[in-house]
């Protein structure tokens, strides 16, 4: 959530940057400022009345001491009137503060000045490509056909048990999934991230803290009886570890990683582009999260991108890195890089990671601060990235490493985890 002082002091810049995100409700900025002006005026009235009450209180004491009881009673009546006015003003102040908050939560984060113009994913900028696309035999099988032939992922069983988008991993398919989880966790720990096993359900406060609520309310699975939500990513519970916390500057940066299943309704998703593992309602993912000082966050963003790239290099997957344009960014992000891997049998790029800097947008909602060297409480910067999302990585590994006799070669870096070289 943007802070009111930032909006007031940088109104023109905020408006220009939000246009880069194609935010359609720019009038909210003026509405928030106008409400804040009104809030300030009422607060001044309240302060003035309090000062008058304090002065009258002293006068009453003096009048009683002088035996001027009638005048003292008049002053008491005057004080009572002021009290009624103050109470009415305080109620109005509370209403205005709620109105300001309700409008602030609808305003997305402003994109960083380096974020390019653009409306859709087609306008994203490819900043790097790596790896080599496999030279497969004619008519390779897409992963959903190969997985069925080898009986390692059963999509029909998933439909029977839960519905489309909930696959069942079997045998060596399950072992491959588990091996990737362990491989990604081990690499993250070696890179200095502390492993966290968080809850996979969150309350409303947690969803609000990282920006999922109210923005993505309809996209998350909701448990109404307990007023809980299934997590869309481990970013949410891990970042919320630091909600309402004041950290010490010496403890920054904080680096956490965690494996969780993730749940997304993906309402309205259908068609060939969501076949197989391309888009699921439940999938496994390793998340990396950092909390940093503001001056360090963009260096941390690059560090996280370099780390995700190193995983794709180890897996020998062809990849590309995209800088997202304003129109394709998330509500909370200030700058985002997407990582895609090439899936040979489908001849398409599949997104496997997003790495984002949220600057103070989440920390303001979370009240996540750190005590700086001069003992002031400052808002920290938060970052997160997928490292990596399993489903599409598995899809690419299956397709890119298939042989003409319908076997799958396991990448060298995973063989100590799987215990087998091929499926």
Image (cartoon, helix red, strand yellow):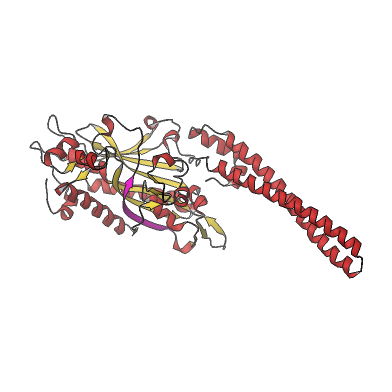
Instruction: Name the residue: 30% across, 58% down.
Output: 189
In the image, residue 193 sits, relative to residue 412, either above or below, namely below
Please identify the quarter of the rendering in which residue 136 is found: top left
Residue 236 placed where, x, y %?
40, 50
Residue sitting at x 27%, y 48%: 311
- Report if residue 47 is visible in the image: yes
Describe residue 294's horizontal placement relative to residue 90 as left or right: left
Q: Which of 269 and 361 is in front in this view?
A: 269
| Extreme residue toward the front, this view | 225
Residue 301: percent from left, percent from top: 40, 48
Q: In which quarter of the image is residue 11?
A: top right
Quadrant (top left, top right, bottom left, bottom right) of the C terminus: top left
Residue placed furthest toward the bottom: 65
In this picture, residue 92 sits left or right of residue 123: right
Q: Decide which of 129, 278 is in the foreground and name it.
A: 278
Q: Position of residue 64 (x, y in %)?
A: 88, 67
Asked whether, in this view, residue 32 is left or right of residue 329, the answer is right
Residue at x 59% of width, y 34% of height: 27
Q: How many marks?
A: 0
Residue occupying image coordinates x 54% and y 35%? 16
Q: Is residue 267 magenta?
A: yes
Choose top left, top right, bottom left or bottom right for residue 133: top left
Relative image position of residue 221 (x, y in whole percent): 37, 44
As for residue 168 lying within the magenta part, the answer is no
- Along the line of sight, the residue nearer the viewer: 413 or 226: 226
Residues in magenta, as a range: 252-269
- In this view of the protein, can residue 134 be seen by the observer? no
């Amino acid at each position: 959530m943007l802070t009111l002082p930032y909006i007031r002091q940088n109104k023109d810049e905020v408006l220009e940057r939000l246009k880069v995100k194609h935010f359609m409700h720019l009038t909210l900025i003026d509405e928030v400022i106008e409400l804040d002006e009104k809030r300030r005026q009422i607060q001044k009235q309240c302060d003035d009345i309090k000062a008058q009450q304090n002065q009258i209180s002293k006068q009453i004491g003096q009048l009683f001491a002088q035996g001027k009881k009638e005048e003292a009673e008049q002053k008491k009546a005057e004080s009572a009137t002021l009290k009624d006015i103050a109470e009415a003003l305080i109620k109005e102040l509370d209403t205005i503060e709620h109105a300001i908050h309700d409008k602030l939560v609808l305003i997305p984060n402003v994109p960083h000045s380096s974020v390019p113009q653009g409306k859709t994913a087609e306008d994203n900028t490819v900043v790097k490509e790596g790896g080599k696309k496999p030279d497969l035999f004619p008519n390779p099988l897409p992963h959903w056909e190969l997985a069925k032939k080898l009986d390692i992922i059963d999509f029909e069983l998933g439909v029977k048990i839960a519905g489309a988008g909930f696959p069942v991993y079997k045998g060596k398919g399950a072992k491959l999934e588990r091996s990737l989880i362990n491989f990604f966790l081990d690499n993250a720990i070696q890179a200095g991230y502390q492993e966290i096993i968080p809850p996979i359900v969150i309350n409303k406060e947690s969803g609000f803290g990282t920006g999922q609520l109210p923005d993505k309310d309809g996209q998350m699975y909701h448990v109404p009886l307990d007023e809980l939500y299934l997590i869309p990513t481990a970013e949410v519970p891990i970042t919320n570890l630091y909600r309402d916390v004041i950290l010490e500057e010496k403890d920054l940066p904080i680096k956490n990683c965690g494996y969780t299943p993730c749940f997304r309704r993906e309402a309205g998703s259908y068609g060939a582009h969501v076949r197989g593992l391309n888009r699921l309602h439940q999938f496994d993912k390793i998340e990396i999260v950092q909390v940093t000082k503001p001056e360090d966050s963009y260096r941390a963003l690059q560090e996280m991108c370099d780390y995700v790239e190193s995983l794709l290099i180890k897996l020998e997957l062809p990849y590309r890195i995209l800088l997202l344009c304003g129109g394709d960014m998330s509500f909370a992000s200030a700058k985002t890089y997407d990582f895609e891997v090439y899936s040979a049998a489908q001849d398409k790029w599949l997104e496997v990671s997003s790495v984002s800097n949220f600057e103070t947008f989440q920390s303001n909602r979370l009240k996540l601060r750190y005590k700086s060297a001069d003992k002031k409480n400052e808002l920290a910067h938060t970052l997160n990235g997928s490292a990596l999302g399993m489903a599409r990585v598995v899809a690419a590994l299956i397709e890119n490493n298939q042989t003409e006799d319908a076997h799958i070669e396991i990448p060298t870096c995973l063989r100590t985890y799987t215990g087998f070289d091929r499926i």
